[in-house]
Amino acid sequence: QAIRENQVSRYASQVSAYPAVRAFLLEMQRNLARTHDVIMDGRDIGTVVLPQADLKIFLTASVEERARRRMLELEERGTPEPYAAILRAIQERDWNDTHRDAAPLRQAEDAVLLGFSQLGSESAWRVGSTRSIEEAAERHGVSLMMLNAYQKQEKQIDAIRSFISYRVDVISFAPIVEDGWDTVLTEAKAAGIPVILVDRLITTEDESLYACFVGADFIKEGRSAGEFLLKKADAMGAKHLNIVEITGTEDSTPQRQRHQGFHDTIAGDERFTVLESISGDFLVSKGEECMRYLLDKYGEDIDVLYSHNDGMTLGAIDAIREYGLSPGSDIIIITVDGEQAAIDLLKAGEINCVVECTPNLGDSVMELAKKLAAGETVPKMSHPDEDVFTEFDDLSDLAPRGY
Ligand code: GZL
């Protein structure tokens, strides 16, 4: 009952204007829900704290009705207060809770509160990306609110809406696919919250819906894969090579652009025929499934596998071995990401080319978030430096990959 005291509710609204307090309480409440069956009551439980709650009940009443009930409650408790004072306190709290960015306590804050929607945990690369964001937030003193969408666009949209209602300083997300973001990003723009796209782009008619993008140049990655194949074909003196392609998540930026960069590079070269291109959704299991299907259909006619990420490549290599062929020699293998497991297979001669796609974007994201929160303008596009590792290189002093 103590938390229902008028004084407590008045100060709760002020103290919770501190982003660090909100971030701490958010994690504490979520941990409770992870370890117990809970019924939680609060203004942002259904939107921010537990957006994935099984059941959400939105109860409201006019400010006058709430003041009347509070007055009766205080009278019953023997601590009566005048109706007018109660009404004013509730109106003030409502205003604070919905206009925090104007709250003097908040403007005194220098900690940036960043809401980040991560698309999922589909690959070792993605896990490395999440780790990079978390560790960089720590290093940069940024209060991070991260929600995992588990490969569902609608969960990313919910997360962005939660960040808007929580009035974070900056929103950032890795869009699982390129289409379908205009509505929710228009809401973020109306709320005056800048948006950073991380790792993947969106398609939109209105470029003002996001402040900037930080992530790979996927066209260049696809071109690097194609350029390796040209060099390899030259080195082999190959007359003709049949290619199969296992692509990433349909309609995602890496899938579209790694495909385009590769095909543009080998286009017109009579030595190459692409037998088939199918999606493995960046998943190890689907990479294996796709390769098994392709081997059943084309068998030993397959000379080259171009796979859009290492996870699918690892699955495909299992299928190639199971079929009785040798990866890296019977079938040339070109892959993207640069996970340790892929580099190890490159050194063992079972992969021929690994195009690097770094997941370590965390520091760039935090620098951009701090600049945007301070009202500075930032470059619209920024790409990290990335490398290509092939069988023609000396890889003996290559540093551990970290993902
Ligand atoms: C690329 C990233 C891709 C990786 C995959 O920047 O979006 O998603 O290549 C990951 O491993 O699943």
Image: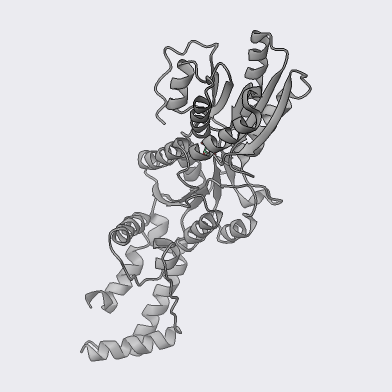
Q: Residue at x 56, y 34 (%)?
A: 292
Q: Quadrant where the C terminus lies?
A: top left
Of 276 and 356, nearer the camera is 276
Find residue 90 and report its horizontal and vertical position in percent.
Answer: 38, 79
Q: Residue at x 62, y 26 (%)?
A: 299
Find residue 331 and report its image quarter. Answer: top right
Q: How many marks?
A: 0
Find residue 194 and report its horizontal and vertical position in percent.
Answer: 55, 51
> Is 232 positioned to the left or the right of 75 in the image?
right
82 w.r.t. 261: above or below: below
390 w.r.t. 323: above or below: above
> Is 313 positioned to the left or the right of 36 in the image?
right
Find residue 198 and report its horizontal and vertical position in percent.
Answer: 53, 42
Find residue 224 and report its image quarter. Answer: top right
Of 306 and 69, nearer the camera is 306
215 w.r.t. 395: above or below: below
Q: Residue at x 26, y 78 (%)?
A: 5
> Is 49 positioned to the left or the right of 372 in the image?
left
Find residue 154 and report its image quarter. Answer: bottom right
Find residue 192 and report its horizontal and vertical position in percent.
Answer: 56, 58
Of 187 and 105, nearer the camera is 187
